[in-house]
Image (cartoon, rainbow, N blue to C red):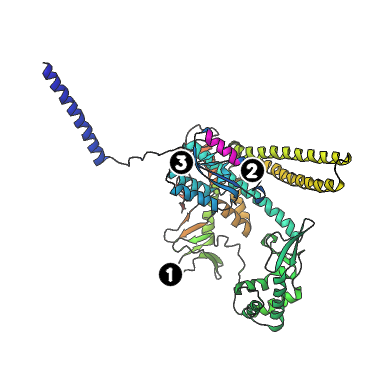
Amino acid sequence: MRKSNEINKKDLEVKSTSDELTEIHFNELFGKGKVPASKKLTNNCVIYTRVSSKSQESGYSLDTQLKENIEFSRKNNYNVLSYFGGTYESASTDERKEFNRMLTFIKKSKEKVTYIIVHMVDRFSRSGANAIYIKEQLKKNNIYIQSVRQPVDVTTSSGDFQQNIQMIFSHYDNQVRREKCVTGIIEALNRGEWCHGVPTGYTAIYEHGKRKIIVNEKGKLLRKAFYWKANEGISNEECRARLEKLGFKVNFQRISEIFKNPFYCGLIAHRLLEGKMVEGNHEKLVSKELFMKVNEVQSKNTHGYKWKEEQIKVPMKIFMRCEKCGLALSGYIVKKKNIWYYKCKTKGCCVNKSAEKLHDTFSEILKAFTIDSKYAPLIKEQMYKTISGLTKETSDNIKHLKANLKEIEGKLSRLEERYVLEEITQELYVKYGEKFKQDKYKVLVELQKLETDSSNHENIIEMTLENAQNLSNMWASGGYEQKRKVQNWVFPVGMRYNKQNDTVRTEEYNYAFLWMACQQQTLSKIKSGIPLLNLKYSALVENTGFEPVTSCLPGKRSSQMS
């Protein structure tokens, strides 16, 4: 009996093993989907620091970032493999030397890197949608961005979405700063002050703290070229050859640009002046009469380009491209019918489209991105929650500057006291007094800038919502420039028209406007997405309150509209 039980037990074990093998065999033959690869997460990380202006390179900002990044890594038991950044790099583009060097290191590192440690998300990038794209590419390789001041669990959908929104607002904040800078440039240009790099033949110097633009030695040679052109009527190539004999090498295209630049006769022309000319404060190279005479000679030249004035009837020129060849569409009018069309000039494409019909479709698209005023308060509240993390670093910097200002004022006070008590000479008093006053002025300027920026976050939210509520009307009622601005706001890289399918494809859209449109559909319980863009949201979660729905955003960056 005992032997029989042992045999039965062995039979059961064999049968069990056989069943398992059969199940594995069936899974291999008939199972669907791929077996997910295990995530290889390590404690290895790299640290990336960056400042947004050259004036901060040797200041407190980089030191603060590095110190707190190292402390954050220590607390989380991260193993720091390397450090990157530590210098000024513009965030307007991701083609940054240190940034690319870091990505190359991560790719080639023998030890798997899992985290990129940054002080704030905007230290990684302020390029909005492009920053999100880079982050997603890193995420596919199990590499995550960790922010010291804006910590989220980046391995979850919710944390990933929060980080996306932080990047969006960093990008928008950057745009607002740029607009403020543009306003200052316009005011300076109207005063006759040239704010950019000086043209060939000029040098910028500083006298008593004021910028002054003067003619240099090359400019004196260029003055000769103006006289040669006006009095002898010689070609630009001959002018260039004569200048080269005098030791000044300039290419043919540049000499042509110089002859056409009114800066040399004391006038300022700039796209921000909207066609207006302003008398500049810089030194004139030639008189207006000589400049005009040179351009009269130039106009007799049959070569060159002829520019056509942009037409309000076709604001989607260049913005709209041919899907077949990628060339930007141009505009033309059928005079007999007085009807405008868009057309691809590539031979054989035969792509054209009624401007009116294309405009109607685009107008309907914008309506999907336009926010209803009744949902604005709820969306605004969510924006405040998202943007609150962006202000902490600014607040800390303001405290540091105020402490620094107090210290400088204390030094000035002690210096005056020692001078009154005749402990130091007048020479030392003047020398160090001037130094402390300059230091104080620099701190005050930086403090004023940060305090102004700190108060801008509420304005950013208000401006965002205001624009989002008026997108459709702004495009419909605006002039050429206004229409172009709205188009580029929503679709930064433009659109492509497919003649065969009569569809338009967009390869990228503004995530800020898309996020608000998504929130509005969540609140209104509309689950259709944006049909004209063939943009379908995942099923919306019920009763989500004010928190963003992480499944709401589409997974693809490109979409279509009929």
3 or 1: mark nearer the eye: 3
- Of 358 and 398, nearer the camera is 398
Of the numbered discs 1 and 2, the one sitting upstream in the chain is 2
Q: Is residue 149 magenta?
A: no
Of the numbered discs 3 and 1, the one sitting upstream in the chain is 3
Per the model, the C-alpha gap separating discs 3 and 2 is 25 Å
| x and y percentages locating residue 294 in the rendered image | 70, 77
Please report the residue visible at 72 percent of the width from the left and 79 percent of the height from the top: 227
Of the numbered discs 3 and 2, the one sitting upstream in the chain is 2
Please report the residue visible at 42 percent of the width from the left and 58 percent of the height from the top: 501
Residue picked out by circle 1: 348
Residue picked out by circle 3: 114
- The amino acid at mark 3 is Thr
Badge 3: residue crowd in 10 Å (few <14, some 14–19, many ≥20): many
Badge 2: residue crowd in 10 Å (few <14, some 14–19, many ≥20): some
| x and y percentages locating residue 44 in the rendered image | 47, 40
Element on which disc 3 rests: loop
